[in-house]
Image: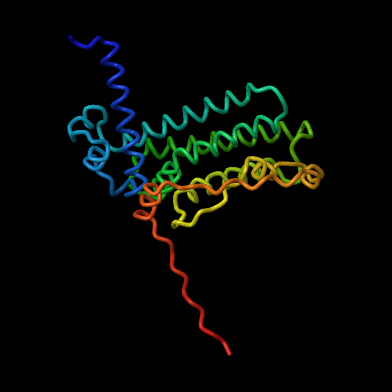
């Protein structure tokens, strides 16, 4: 029995998702410059020609991954903005969602970091990355400023500084989750991250957040990071008399 048009569309969507997921892993492992379409096809378990049927080149694949990430970020932030409560409550929800995505897709942070350092990205994709970064920063500043005006978020630092600190913490966690060198680490709780934004008085009065459970990093993910980034070896100090 032939497939219906709806079935064909579902199959196309499923194939596209398979390709994007495989590409994310390969980009994180090999970097954008060294990745070939054949690498992505092999990771996805698809033929070389089938990948080209969906995407013209690896720039188009990378751009599609970024578009999906940007759409999810905007959707999640819009959902958080619709929540009742204070500015801190809405930011707390955003941080919780971000932490969850970091654990679910640890390769995304490394993939983007490597792409930023690459000279071979096409101008369109590079512009898309810059637009995404600017939008994320601008929206974070706006939400922090609203909280400061209402006295819900500390004014101990400008909103731009607090937004930069918050984004650096989250992006650093994304890389730490992936590049752990087989050493388990304690993932910060949402409360720990949010304490960066609290007023000084609230910071002094806030109870110490419970320590998070040790994060168990999948062995396959650790192997992925180890193959792309090697930690620097410490040079032993000479004994001084």
Q: Which colour style is shown?
A: rainbow
Question: As rendered, which of 77 and 98 lies closer to the eye?
Answer: 98
Image quarter hosting the C terminus: bottom right
Measuring 41% from the left and 34% from the top, which residue is drawn there?
66
In the image, residue 233 sits, relative to residue 7, either above or below, namely below
* The quadrant where residue 2 appears: top left
The image shows residue 168 at horizontal and vertical percentages of 57, 47
The image shows residue 36 at horizontal and vertical percentages of 24, 43
Question: As rendered, which of 165 and 17 lies closer to the eye?
Answer: 17
Residue at the extreme bottom of the image, as rendered: 241
In the image, residue 78 sits, relative to residue 25, either above or below, namely above
The image shows residue 160 at horizontal and vertical percentages of 65, 42
* The quadrant where residue 40 appears: top left
**Left or right: 132 in relation to 63:** right
Image quarter hosting the N terminus: top left
Measuring 44% from the left and 57% from the top, which residue is drawn there?
181
């Amino acid at each position: 029995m032939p497939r219906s048009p709806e079935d064909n569309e579902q199959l196309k969507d499923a194939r596209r998702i398979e390709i994007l997921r495989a590409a994310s892993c390969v980009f994180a492992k090999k970097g954008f410059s060294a990745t070939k379409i054949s690498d992505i096809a092999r990771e996805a378990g698809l033929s070389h020609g089938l990948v080209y049927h969906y995407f013209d080149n690896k720039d188009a694949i990378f751009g599609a991954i970024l578009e999906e990430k940007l759409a999810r970020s905007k959707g999640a932030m819009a959902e958080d903005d619709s929540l009742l409560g204070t500015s801190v409550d809405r930011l707390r929800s955003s941080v919780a969602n971000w932490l969850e995505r970091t654990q679910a897709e640890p390769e995304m942070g490394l993939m983007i970091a490597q792409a930023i350092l690459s000279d071979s990205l096409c101008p369109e994709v590079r512009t898309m990355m810059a637009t995404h970064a600017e939008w994320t920063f601008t929206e974070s500043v706006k939400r922090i400023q609203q909280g400061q005006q209402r006295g819900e978020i500390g004014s101990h630092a400008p909103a731009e500084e607090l937004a930069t600190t918050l984004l650096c913490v989250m992006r650093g966690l994304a890389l730490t989750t992936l590049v752990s060198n087989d050493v388990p680490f304690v993932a910060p709780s949402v409360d720990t991250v949010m304490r960066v934004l609290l007023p000084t008085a609230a910071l002094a009065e806030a109870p110490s957040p419970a320590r998070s459970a040790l994060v168990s990093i999948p062995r396959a993910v650790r192997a992925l990071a180890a193959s792309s980034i090697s930690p620097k070896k410490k040079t032993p100090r000479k004994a001084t008399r």
